Amino acid sequence: SVQTQIGDFNFGSLFRMVLNSFSDLLSNAFMILLYALFILFEENNFKVKLKNLIREEHQFLMFNNTKNKIEKSISDYFRLKAFVSLLTGFLSYISLYLIGIDSPAFWAFLIFILNFIPTIGSLIGTIFPAVFSLLQFGTLTPFFLVLIIVGVIQVIVGNIIEPRIMGRSMNISPLVTILALTFWGMIWGIIGMVLSIPIMVVLVITFSQFESTRPVAILLSEKGEIDDIEN
């Protein structure tokens, strides 16, 4: 029976894993914010250093233009991703509240955080409250309701709304997204997954600025189209 199977499941281990992952994410996010703060302090002097380092006007303009492109792309990505994640979390909160799941605000916040992880974050964010509903109710109906309703929200927001507001600003191949997610996740864990897309955006923009590395940028891009070097 469902009750028997639920009784055999170790929910304590599941919640310890969730809380440990959440704690690691917050601690790593604090370090990232700390690094970002020091980068912002350094930005005022960086342009002067760059100008003194690169004497030729043409090269200076190219490097400065590349820096501005990277700053705008990363800023746009996190701003739009935060909006999309907030929308997903808000709609999920309403759904979980109506279904009757305990602590819907916590699960909505977890969904908001996990949505920053490309591809797999939305899947994990749907599974956690669905599994919790089994513990709370002991029946399959709320479990399937959470899977279907929250899953539909994730699909609509992630596959319809997000691509429309993101547009071509990221220009990263889906295959490259998965590979980058795996690679940086292995190196830096959850934070590596969150930063995997911004890192690839930086690489594509940087590689596109030089004739020798332009083919690499084309291979990493979504449709093989990148901006002209002089733009």
Image (cartoon, rainbow, N blue to C red):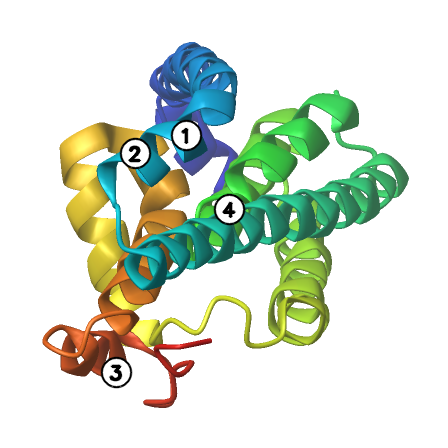
Residue on which the image places disc 1: 48
Q: Is residue 102 visible?
A: no
Residue drawn at 34 percent across, 17 percent down:
13
Considering only order in the chain, which callout, 3 or 2, is on the residue closer to the N terminus? 2
Considering only order in the chain, which callout, 1 or 3, is on the residue closer to the N terminus? 1
Where in the figure is residue 138, as x and y percent of width and height?
61, 33
Q: Which picture quadrant has residue 147? A: bottom right
Nearer the camera: disc 2 or disc 3: 2
Question: How many other residues sit within 10 Å of disc 4, few (<14), some (14-19) or many (≥20)?
Answer: few
Q: CA distance from mark 3 to mark 1?
A: 31 Å
Residue on which the image places disc 2: 52
Q: Are marks 2 and 4 in contact (CB under 8 Å)?
A: no
Horizontal relation, residue 105 to residue 41: left or right: right
Given the image, on which type of amino acid does mark 2 rest? Asn
Where in the figure is residue 88, as x and y percent of width and height?
72, 49
Q: Is residue 176 visible?
A: yes
Given the image, on which type of amino acid does mark 3 rest? Ile
